[in-house]
């Protein structure tokens, strides 16, 4: 499984990128502390990050098909480094600037999935993309764990000081990823390039959000069933929007969790998710009916997801729910990606994953606005929305 050093190199870049993104999670409330409706400002930051990908993701995906995956890895890693440097002042304005800047170059995951598909034999595709999901989960463990360990070891008690040290760690790790990205070998050899006129057309189309659906419909004619998978991914993105809401919910809601509590929680969440994902994708995903599995995981997951809003002050109940979460709808993402990867070719893989990421960005932007507004009414209400989105996934996968 891990004999391909090239694949390991890609996994290392993914891992560090997720650690960089998740390490600041426990201290994010410090960027909006003192402002009215802090949960709304956190939601706005997420919306900026994800919404700007509507423009950047399809363009970067097309460029990765024309010029190779490696230049996009480099661009994304440098963009993340610059964006992380903006967090140093620990001020809300700079945090919003970070979200916008990082979103502009965040074509990494469309390119990652293209690169993994490039070098994966058909029989290993679900496994390798599933391991990518497990690596992401592992990053969610290590990120908050590193933040908590740093805060505990240095005995940092001032919240702003905690945030500054954690941001400094994120900047250092993102610099390491720049180095790894520049050392990466190309997975898409002899790309045909992109003509200047074609690039101009692509840029205009990227600025026209409405063209994304039209382009996906065109791809549907070449790859029947693709559009339905994209719509499933869109609905799933709406459901797992709670990942972006969770820090605000547990820190500002009845649970009143501090940075250490949040770190420990994500350690448990990520660790369990890694173990379950590794077992599922390593031994089961290729042997089951993937579409039927998506249906049942989503159907069972609807009440589980809605239950987050009912935990009250019980951390025990929170941990019980997250355990069931890891056994159900947390496994859906890799299944959809595997089915989608089978409907791509060497010439349009980056474009398709880029269009898909743009649709995910649109869904994330929309769900962020919805949960931000619902949270003003009641911090528990967004989980009803997340559960409804997951029900749509089950409905789409029913046949």
Image: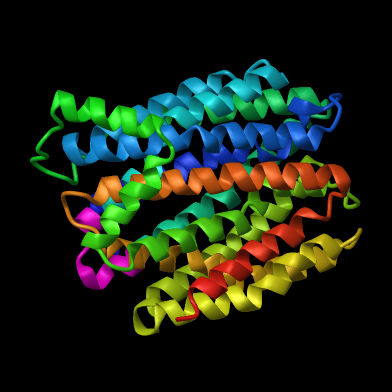
Q: Position of residue 181 (x, y in %)?
A: 31, 34
Residue furthest toward the top?
Answer: 89
Q: Is residue 312 left or right of residue 212?
A: right
* Identity of the residue drawn at 82% across and 60% down: 309
Q: Position of residue 386 (x, y in %)?
A: 68, 59
Q: Is residue 56 above or below residue 213?
A: above
324, 231: nearer the viewer: 231
Residue 288 shows in the view = yes
Q: Position of residue 313 (x, y in %)?
A: 91, 58
Name the magenta segment's main secondary structure. Answer: helix
The tally of labels here is 0
- In magenta, the rendered stretch is 117-128
* Identity of the residue drawn at 68% across and 71% down: 302
223, 322: nearer the viewer: 223
The quadrant of the image that shows the N terminus is bottom left
Q: Is residue 239 above or below residue 25?
A: below
Tell me where residue 31 sits by quadrant.
Answer: top right
Q: Is residue 389 left or right of residue 107?
A: right
150, 163: nearer the viewer: 163
Q: Magenta includes 122?
A: yes
* Identity of the residue drawn at 59% across and 24% down: 168
Residue 145 shows in the view = no
Q: Position of residue 395 (x, y in %)?
A: 55, 74
Q: Magenta includes 226?
A: no
Q: Is residue 381 left or right of residue 322?
A: right
Q: Is residue 188 left or right of residue 334?
A: left
* Identity of the residue drawn at 81% across and 46% down: 375
């Amino acid at each position: 499984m891990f004999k391909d050093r090239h694949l390991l190199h890609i996994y290392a870049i993914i891992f560090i990128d997720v650690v960089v993104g998740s390490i600041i999670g426990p201290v994010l409330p410090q960027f909006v502390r003192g402002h009215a409706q802090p949960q709304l400002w956190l939601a706005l930051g997420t919306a900026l990050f994800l919404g700007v990908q509507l423009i950047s993701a399809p363009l970067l995906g097309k460029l990765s098909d024309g010029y190779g995956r490696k230049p996009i890895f480099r661009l994304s890693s440098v963009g993340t480094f610059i964006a992380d440097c903006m967090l140093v002042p620990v001020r809300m304005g700079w945090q919003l600037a970070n979200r916008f800047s990082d979103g502009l170059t965040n074509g990494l995951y469309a390119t990652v999935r293209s690169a993994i598909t490039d070098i994966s034999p058909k029989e290993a595709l679900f496994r390798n993309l599933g391991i990518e999901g497990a690596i992401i989960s592992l990053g969610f463990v290590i990120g908050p764990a590193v933040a908590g360990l740093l805060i505990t070891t240095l005995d940092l008690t001032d919240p702003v000081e905690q945030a500054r040290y954690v941001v400094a760690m994120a900047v250092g790790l993102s610099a390491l990823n720049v180095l790894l990205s520049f050392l990466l070998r190309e997975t898409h050899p002899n790309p045909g390039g992109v003509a200047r006129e074609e690039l101009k057309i692509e840029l205009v189309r990227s600025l026209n959000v409405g063209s994304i659906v039209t382009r996906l419909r065109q791809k549907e004619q070449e790859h029947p069933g693709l559009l339905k998978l994209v719509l499933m991914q869109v609905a799933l993105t709406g459901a797992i929007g709670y990942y972006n809401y969770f820090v605000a919910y547990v820190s500002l809601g009845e649970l009143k969790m501090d940075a250490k509590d949040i770190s420990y929680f994500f350690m448990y969440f990520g660790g369990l998710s890694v173990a379950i994902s590794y077992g599922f994708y390593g031994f089961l995903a290729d042997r089951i009916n993937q579409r039927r599995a998506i249906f049942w995981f989503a159907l069972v997951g609807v009440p589980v997801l809605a239950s987050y809003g009912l935990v009250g002050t019980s951390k025990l109940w929170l941990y019980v729910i997250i355990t069931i979460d890891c056994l159900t709808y947390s496994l859906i993402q890799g299944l959809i990606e595997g089915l989608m990867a089978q409907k791509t070719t060497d010439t349009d893989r980056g474009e398709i994953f880029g269009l898909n990421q743009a649709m995910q960005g649109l869904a994330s932007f929309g769900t962020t606005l919805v949960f931000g507004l619902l949270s003003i009414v009641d911090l528990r209400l967004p989980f009803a929305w997340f559960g409804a989105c997951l029900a749509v996934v089950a409905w789409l996968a029913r046949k």
